[in-house]
Amino acid sequence: MRSIYVQPPKGTYEIIVVDNASVDGSANMIESEFPDVVLICNAKNFGYARANNQGAEIAKGKYILLLGSDTEVRGNALEKMIQFMNEYHNAGAVGCKLVTPDGKLQPSCKRFPTPLNAAALYCSLNWLNSGYLMKKFKHDVVRSVDQPDATCLIVRKAIVDSFGLFDERLTILYNDVELCRRIKHSGWEIYFTPLAVVMHHGSRSTKQANPKLRLEMYCNILLYYRMHFGRKAEYFLLPILLFRLMAVTKSPIALKLFSFHHDTKAELSLLHSQLR
């Protein structure tokens, strides 16, 4: 966030931070050091999707920037992304080039995944996913893409006002992919631009996730493929995800993936509240 103040975009802008019941003093730090920031403090962790939706609902600008807390804006990246959106009137969203702290490129664009892509991914057979992962894309030219990384993504506010930001049933994973699908299917283009650069430190939160949180993540995966490819795709992926979840967590909690088959939206929300 500090990097935004160092290289702010031109014109009027607002910064909205949604704190999901953090316990590290982040909210107090923001209140004392950044009094101009609009701070929403949740009494409990509502998840990534809902927290972003809370911010989007009160945003007043023409564009909404989704920016991860583990990023640093380089140069005038935000201004370049805004200029891009102003010039490309068919752009519903635009992503930027991400680099690691040592300056290396972090691939940030993918095609929309199919159940076969998911099977290869969760079987650790990514050599079969070169097309889906856009392995040959050097991230050095402007081009239309399916899904740039939502670590730094600008979306038109008019789109959010039309059909919302994230689907809150996808509490942790695939909510950004689902958003990009809706944007593209509504007739808008999504672009990647290498002119704007943001440093991404990389979050370790999912790597350190406990078994309950991992169960929720895998429920999100199943739900995404159920939503877009039907029950056959879900049944196809279930044994793969079940085996992987059991291997990672070494816990019988993985067996709860079976019961998730019958969860409705309300039941999934209940599951999320129980896991938090």
Image (cartoon, grey):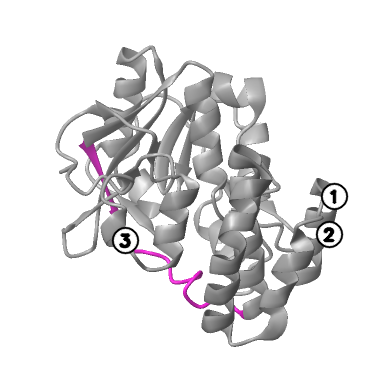
Question: What residue is disc 2 on?
Answer: 270
Question: What residue is disc 3 on?
Answer: 126
Identify the amino acid type marked 2: Leu
Residue visible at 58% across and 56% down?
A: 236
Q: Main secondary structure of the magenta part?
A: loop
Mark 2 or mark 3: which is in front? 3
Q: Residues within 10 Å of mark 2 (few under 14, many from 20)?
A: few
Q: Is residue 36 magenta?
A: no
Q: Is residue 198 magenta?
A: yes
Identify the amino acid type marked 3: Asn
Question: What residue is disc 1 on?
Answer: 266
Identify the amino acid type marked 1: Ala
Q: Which residues are magenta?
A: 195-210
First reached walking from the N terminus: tag 3 or tag 1? 3
Identify the image quadrant of the C terminus.
bottom right
The secondary element bearing badge 2 is classed as helix
Q: Tell me whether the residue at label 2 lies in contact with that at label 3, contact meaning CB atoms closer than 8 angstroms.
A: no
